[in-house]
Image: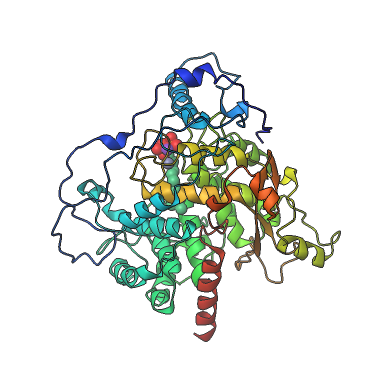
Amino acid sequence: KLASRLTPKQANMSSAASTSPAPQPSSTSKSPQPESPITVLGDGNEQNDDNDGFVDEEIFVADAKGFPAHMIPDLYTEPPPIRDALVTETSRVQDKTVDVCLPYLTGEEDGHLVYNPHGVPSLEREKHIGFLHKSLGRLPGGFVAADASRPWFLYWALSGLVLLGEDVSSYREAVIETALSFQNEQGGFGGGGKQTSHLATTYATVLAIALVGGEEAYEVIDRDAMWRWLCSLKQPDGGFQVCVGGEEDIRGAYCATVIITLLNIPLELTPASPAREGGLVNLLAGLGDYVRRCQTYEGGISGQPNAEAHGAYAFCALGCLSLLDDPRRIFHRYLNVPRLITWLSSRQYAPEGGFSGRTNKLVDGCYSHWVGACFPLIEACLSPASSGSEPAETATAAATTTHKLPPASETLFSREGLIRYILCCCQDETRRGGLRDKPGKMSDSYHTNYVLAGLSAAQHFWTLSLPLEEPAVPVPPSPEPVANPPEWSVLPLYLADGREAGGDDEATAATTLFNQSDRVRPVHPVYALPQEVVDTIRGYFFIAKEGA
Ligand code: FPP
Ligand code: K
Ligand code: ZN
């Protein structure tokens, strides 16, 4: 944990900050774009009758603003005090990244963000909403390379809009038509019409369907074909190939587990499933052991056994396990949790405040989710495990009140650091809007969604609603496991005077680190969807299966 106290800021800004050149936004480039050949929404039969891309290239010039007052801890305004003397390409790009972030963190960057007295800018909500709506329209020609990611573009934009408080049900008809054009008779969704089904694009399509909601959207999904297709991807070692004949990795394990639990897919393996050669009979069997084999010597999680640990894969691992059983039990069964915490904690950097994806690499806004969302899961797995010492009523009451202060020891990352990185460094300050990897990078819908999801993780506190009970039904490593995910509850967090605090009184709100109007919606720590979206689609398919 990066401990920090709010101290009055010195009158002089740090020399490193004041000598840093202000980065030029890269969105000023005027390279002409060819006519757009793709749109994210639609069945592929639309006419392209104009070529107006969605990228706004003008810079929005606002009045110069003063420095934020005195309230930024030195941790976020000074270069790191401890440095490795060895200079390499790695240390040079790290130094450059600090140089490019510091002016934004101190408020010296002559940009257009509006800082509060804590030196935290406000969320440019309307600009980001506008950016995401545009991203669902026609895209510039360069996006042809991303044609197989149309389901992702759909999910990122809809999810980002929902995080920002928008109602996306007006996209329902378009999502239905689009998703139908992605679906294959053999089950699953491809990245576009006539493309092979893939677990990542199926995951993204299912999430997009969940976000627009409604029976007509849910009924797009051919669950029987989906079941057969998932069984054809299940491997004898417990993992999943991402497509028939494709690579087996932990993205597959996470995406498959999300799809299976959201849609209540039957767990019995088809006779033709390759996993039967390993003696498996169940779609969820062997997943815990597969995840275990992906933990590396560093303590983090790699995409497949014996590869390099990366934050995105840590989230996939913890998300997958959290859907199989209660994190308080299953994380300890399959992972070395202390070593994982060490690795995850090492991802957060100062002064930047954000997370990197792997050892010796740079902060990037998208890891606000991939790494940031690991912390609610890890924090939950360390919460009291036994119902013996604590009556059930107490635990339930504590989880539902908005006034409970989470003990500081339950917060294992610097929420303040992450919020500062996101609001200072990740917002496109031009009229374009959207969120980004780091200053100098273009915003895009992927970063917009995952930066906002990370902001949500920093602004909320998730707890497991009930004490850990012995499961009534077998969970992994049983040969016939069922998914036994716990119930989650969420509290809004108020970060006041450097403390993590809960409470919704006005006095607290007035002194908080971030403006209360800048709170984004809570997202379920495993599904990366609002909880009611998860509950509604799971409720629908639970009934669908019981009736079938
Ligand atoms: C490295 O990229 C990135 C990876 C090795 C994995 C990225 C995977 C995801 C973001 C998502 C996977 C999850 C699902 C659900 C599909 P890089 O070298 O460009 O970035 P880096 O320098 O930050 O590591
Ligand atoms: K990156
Ligand atoms: Zn990124």
- Give the quarter of the image for residue 132: bottom left
For the image, the number of numbered tags is 0
Q: Quadrant of the N terminus?
A: top right
Frontmost residue, 267 versus 144: 144
Q: Residue furthest right?
A: 389
In the displayed structure, 408 sits above or below 157; it is above
Q: Is residue 247 left or right of residue 344?
A: left
Image location of residue 363, percent across then percent down: 48, 34
The answer to whether residue 281 of the structure is visible from this angle is no
Q: Based on the displayed image, in which of its 4 quarters is residue 468 positioned? A: bottom right
Q: Ligand 1 shows up in which quadrant of the image?
A: top left
Residue 409 can be seen, yes or no:
yes
Q: Looking at the picture, how far across and down is residue 501, in whole percent?
A: 71, 47
x and y percent of residue 278 in the render? 51, 60
As drawn, 36 above or below 344: below
Left or right? Give the position of 63 relative to 123.
Answer: left
Residue 46's place in the image compared with 367, above or below, is below
